[in-house]
Image (spheres, coloured by chain):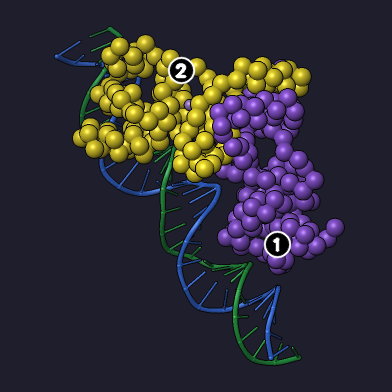
Chain colours: A purple, B yellow, C green, D blue
Amino acid sequence: MSVVRLLKSYNIRSTRQRAEVLAGVISFKQRHFSSEDVLSFLTQKKRKVSRATTFRTLRLFSKKGLLRSLDLGKGWAIYEVAVDSPHHDHLYCIKCGKIIEFEEHQIERLQDKACRKRNFRSLGHTLRIVGFCRECQK
Amino acid sequence: MSVVRLLKSYNIRSTRQRAEVLAGVISFKQRHFSSEDVLSFLTQKKRKVSRATTFRTLRLFSKKGLLRSLDLGKGWAIYEVAVDSPHHDHLYCIKCGKIIEFEEHQIERLQDKACRKRNFRSLGHTLRIVGFCRECQK
DNA sequence: ATATTATTTGAGACTGAGTCTCAAATATAC
DNA sequence: GTATATTTGAGACTCAGTCTCAAATAATAT
Ligand SMILES: [Mn+2]
Ligand SMILES: [Mn+2]
Ligand SMILES: [Zn+2]
Ligand SMILES: [Zn+2]
C-alpha cells in the first residue's frame, strides 16, 4: 500500500512531510528507532522535514496506532511500526543494545487475572526485561 | 534504626544532607515520590539540601539499594523506599494517579522461563500496567 | 478554478528533569 | 592536631521534547 493510502486508512491527513516520515520509518532496517534516528535519516536523504514536525508526526502516528512508542529506559522514546504487529514485550541487552521481541500468552493471561483480582481495568502494559543477550554473556 | 546507622549499613558515608534526605523519604506518607517531592519537602521543613545534592543522593541511594527508582511513564523518575520491600510490580491509575503494588509469583516464574528459552540473562524487569483503579471506573 | 476555511508547517525560543563544574566545606585517615 | 579523600552548593549547562505564531498548504464550498 502506498504511504498516502496507508495514512488515509489510519485517518491521518496526508502531507508531504508525513509521507516522508512514514516512508522513512517503513524503510528502516532497524525495527526500533528513536526520534533522532528519524531526523538524521531524513536529513541524510535530503527530505526536508523540520524538527518540530518530525516530533509532532511521531507523536501523531503513535496516537493513531501507526507506530508504537516504547520506553526502554534510555531516557527518550523508542518507536516501532505497529502496522501488522500485535502487542509484545521486550528483552533489552544493556551491553550491545539489542532488542528482542517476545510474547508469552501465559504471562498476558496472568496479568489480566492480576488486574481482575484487584478490580483494575487495564488499558495496556509494559513489560521490559533488561540483561545480557546470548552473545553478550560470553 | 537511626538514619545514620541505616546509611552505614548500606555502605553509604553519612553526611548531614544524606541523613536529611533519608529521614525525609522515610517519613513520607506517600510511598511513591518524585525528586521534586523530596526537594519541596526539604525546603518546607527548612532542611537545607541543594538541588544538585538531592538528585545525587537519590541516585546514590538507588544504586546502593536503599531506594528503588521506578519509571511510571510520567517523564521523570519515581522513587520508593526499598528497605524491607522485596521486588514487585505496579498498577498505575491514569485518572487519579494511584499506584497499586502487586506481586504474582507465577508471572515472575514465567518471565524467568521466557528468558531461559531465549538464552537471555535477566538482571531485572519492569512490569507496569496502566488503566483505571476500582474507584475511577465508576 | 477560485475563494474561503481549517489544518499543518518551520524557525527558533522555551521547558524542565537531570547533570556537570569546580572551588569551598566537610569527613575520614593518620 | 595535619593530610588526604570525599562531598557539597551555586548556577551554568544538556538535551529530548514542546510551544508560538506567522506563513504555507490542504480540504471544502461556490
Ligand atoms: Mn518491539
Ligand atoms: Mn512500589
Ligand atoms: Zn547483547
Ligand atoms: Zn484511580
Q: Can residue A125 be seen in this view?
A: yes
Asked if residue A82 is positioned above or below residue B81 in the image, the reply reads below
Q: In this view, does A100 lie to the left or right of B56?
A: right
Asked if residue C2 is positioned above or below residue A40 in the image, the reply reads below
Distance Cα–Cα, label 2 vs label 1? 46 Å
Q: Mark 2 points at which residue?
A: B85
Position of the C terminus of chain A, as image quadrant, is top right
Secondary structure, mark 1, is loop
Q: Which disc is residue A12 wearing?
A: 1
Q: Which amino acid does label 1 sit on?
A: Ile
Asked if residue A56 is positioned above or below residue A29 in the image, the reply reads below
Chain under callout 2: B
Chain under callout 1: A
Crowding near the residue tagged with mark 1, few <14, some 14–19, many ≥20 C-alpha atoms within 10 Å: some
The percent position of residue B103, horizontal first and vertical second, equals 56, 21
Q: Can residue A92 be seen in this view?
A: no
Residue reaching furthest to the right: A1
Residue placed most toward the observer, A11 or B16: A11
